[in-house]
Image (cartoon, grey):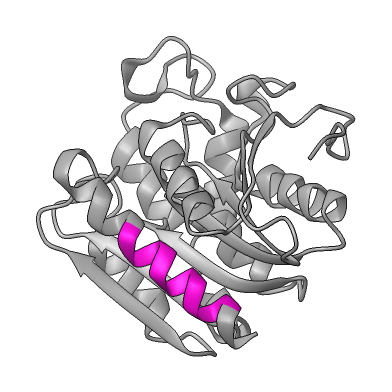
């Protein structure tokens, strides 16, 4: 799989391709969360697990993140929703499953609610109440002056905060998402509450499955990576087999 992917601003989107069954028409796109990128260890493990099961997939870094072009301070949910659309454009001959972690989960919910090219959706600790998240995590930080979680590589911008406040919540997207949807959330997630997944799953318009992983944190660390990967691979395999 080759070729540049660029967003509407002309910024190159960095991606890594994992080949599964080359004859399959299915492709999984994996998106990360805020301050993350495509090389988060648990996302790499997930991609490798999918490929081992014959499921081709691409890990992407949204613009302004990782090795993708663009400025981190321009990054927000709305821009990443548009980025995802450009990635789907690039793979227009494929049947798309999107897997999004954290803020990438919010990106997936918004995109899937209005883009019929996404046939299956997976949210991993997906952010739902975006305004609440911004206030809880960064409410004491001055935008354009301070940083996210005191990380100097991740300055907090007003562009980011204003976008999360304007979206407020992805719950209104739920009834519009009528495709099969898997939501996985750790019981010990102290970044995005488990209740976020419960709230949007309750109003989803299609067949949903919400899986709570006891003891897992926001990034499904340590012994919690394997059960997350096993569940996602099994679920995606089942959906592809039905399609």
Q: Residue at x 28, y 61 (%)?
A: 185
183, above or below 238, in the image: above
The residue at 49%/18% (across/down) is: 155
Residue closest to the far left: 215
Pick whichever, 54 or 102, lies toward us: 54
Q: Is residue 229 shown left or right of residue 178?
A: left
Q: Most extreme residue toward the top, as rendered?
A: 152
Stretch of the chain drawn in magenta: 230-240
**Nearest the eye: 145 or 233:** 233
Helix, strand or loop for the magenta stretch, by majority = helix
* Residue 162 vertical position relative to residue 151 in the rendered view, above or below: below
Q: Quadrant of residue 66?
A: top right
| Residue at left offset 43%, top offset 50% | 49
Residue at 79% over, 63% down = 94
Query: The C terminus lies in which quarter of the figure?
Result: bottom right
Residue 61 is left or right of residue 216, and the answer is: right
Res 128 seen here:
no
User: Residue 41's image quarter?
Assistant: top left
Q: Position of residue 232 (x, y in %)?
A: 40, 63
Q: Position of residue 167 (x, y in %)?
A: 57, 58
Given residues 41 and 139, the one toward you in this image is 41
């Amino acid at each position: 799989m080759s070729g540049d992917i660029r967003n509407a601003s002309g910024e190159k989107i960095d991606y890594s391709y994992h080949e599964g069954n080359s004859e399959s028409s299915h492709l999984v796109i994996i998106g990360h969360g805020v301050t993350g990128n495509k090389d988060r260890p648990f996302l790499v493990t997930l991609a490798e697990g999918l490929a081992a099961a014959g499921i081709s997939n691409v890990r992407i870094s949204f613009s302004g993140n990782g090795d993708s072009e663009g400025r981190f301070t321009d990054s927000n949910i709305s821009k990443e929703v548009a980025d995802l659309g450009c990635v789907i454009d690039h793979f227009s001959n494929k049947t798309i499953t999107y897997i999004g972690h954290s803020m990438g989960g919010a990106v997936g919910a918004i995109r899937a609610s209005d883009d019929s090219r996404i046939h299956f959706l997976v949210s991993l600790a997906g952010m739902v109440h975006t305004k609440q998240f911004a206030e809880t995590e960064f409410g004491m930080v001055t935008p354009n002056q301070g940083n996210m979680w005191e990380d100097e590589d991740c300055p907090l911008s007003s562009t980011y905060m204003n976008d999360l406040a304007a979206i407020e919540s992805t719950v209104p997207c739920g009834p519009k998402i009528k495709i099969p949807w898997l939501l996985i959330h750790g019981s010990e997630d102290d970044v995005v509450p488990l209740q976020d997944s419960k709230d949007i799953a309750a109003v989803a318009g299609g067949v949903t499955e919400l899986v709570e992983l006891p003891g897992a944190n926001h990034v499904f660390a340590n012994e919690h990576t394997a059960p997350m990967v096993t569940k996602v691979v099994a679920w995606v395999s089942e959906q592809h087999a039905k399609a």
